[in-house]
Amino acid sequence: MGKKAYPLMGGLLILCILYALVTHTSTAVSTGGAGQASPAAAASEPAHPADEADDWQLILVNKTHIMPEDYTVSTAKVGAYLVDRRIAEPLSEMIDAAAEEGVTLRIGSAYRSVAYQRDVFDRNVEQLKKRGYSEERAKEITSESIADPGTSEHSLGLAVDFARGDNTDFVESYEKTEQFAWLSAHAAEYGFICRYSKDKESITGYTYEPWHYRYVGAKHAREISAKGLCLEEYLGEV
Ligand SMILES: [Zn+2]
């Protein structure tokens, strides 16, 4: 090492001491703040699940996350039903795989435009009013099972309702069908989750819907299912 190196090393030493002082000071400030994570903890925190190129799979639409007015869906048909074209293939594959095991999955509803959703909602409100409910109460009851326009995943084209038999009635007894048993075991492999679980009603804001499946991609579906989470919990939106 030549003589010229010493001033350089001295400078580096001073820099190191300064760095140590600054780091120590900022750590002390952080730990003093109530509930604040230390810089080390923040750095090791996992990335938000939606911070990826495939984040369309995790778009959250619910009663507090209203769909953007300008959201457009490029659709494709699966059977007689329209879905977001990006899920047509996994959905078809899932239906085919079930069929190979003798289980017939019948789509009863898929993509619904916001305008159509408004129709469905309003018709239900009218029916309840005919049964004697006030308008306000009829809307409340309707909201428990039918999404307000702009708050339905069906308008994303990423949700599918499976009908029981040839019946388009969607009822809780779907959970007793062989279709539900098959979906519970395999839906995640194809990227689908049962979106409104029985034990998550207080978080999702929806009553249990064993027939409603939402596409989130296989990677996320597997993790969500394995951890027993609902989408809101997975996204940290609780
Ligand atoms: Zn549905």
Image (cartoon, rainbow, N blue to C red):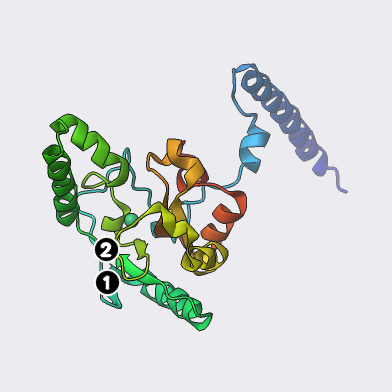
Residue 57 in view of the camera: no
Residue in the foreground of this view, choosing between 9 and 99: 99
Residue neighbourhood size for the residue with mark 2, other residues' Cα within 10 Å, grouped as few (<14), some (14–19), many (≥20): many
What's the residue type where badge 1 is placed?
Tyr
The disc placed on residue 3 is none
Q: Residues within 10 Å of mark 1 (few under 14, many from 20)?
A: some
Horizontal side, residue 45 vs residue 72: left or right:
right
Q: Quadrant of residue 55?
A: bottom left
CB within 8 Å, label 2 to label 1: yes
Q: Which mark is residue 81?
A: 1
Q: Residue furthest bottom?
A: 100
Q: Measured along the vertical axis of the image, is residue 88 above or below residue 25?
A: below
- Residue 218 percent coordinates (x, y): 52, 65
88 relative to 117 in the view: left or right:
right
Name which residue lies at 19% across and 36% down: 138
Q: Secondary structure at mark 2?
A: loop
Q: Earlier in the sequence, mark 2 or mark 1?
A: 1
75 lies above or below 51: below
Across and down, in percent, residue 137 comes to 21, 31
Quick one: 217 or 122, which is closer to the camera?
122
Which disc is residue 111 wearing?
2
Q: Is residue 95 above or below residue 22?
A: below
- Please tell me in which quarter of the rendered image ligand 1 is found: bottom left
| Residue 36 percent coordinates (x, y) | 59, 25
Q: Residue furthest right?
A: 1
Q: Position of residue 212 (x, y in %)?
A: 39, 57
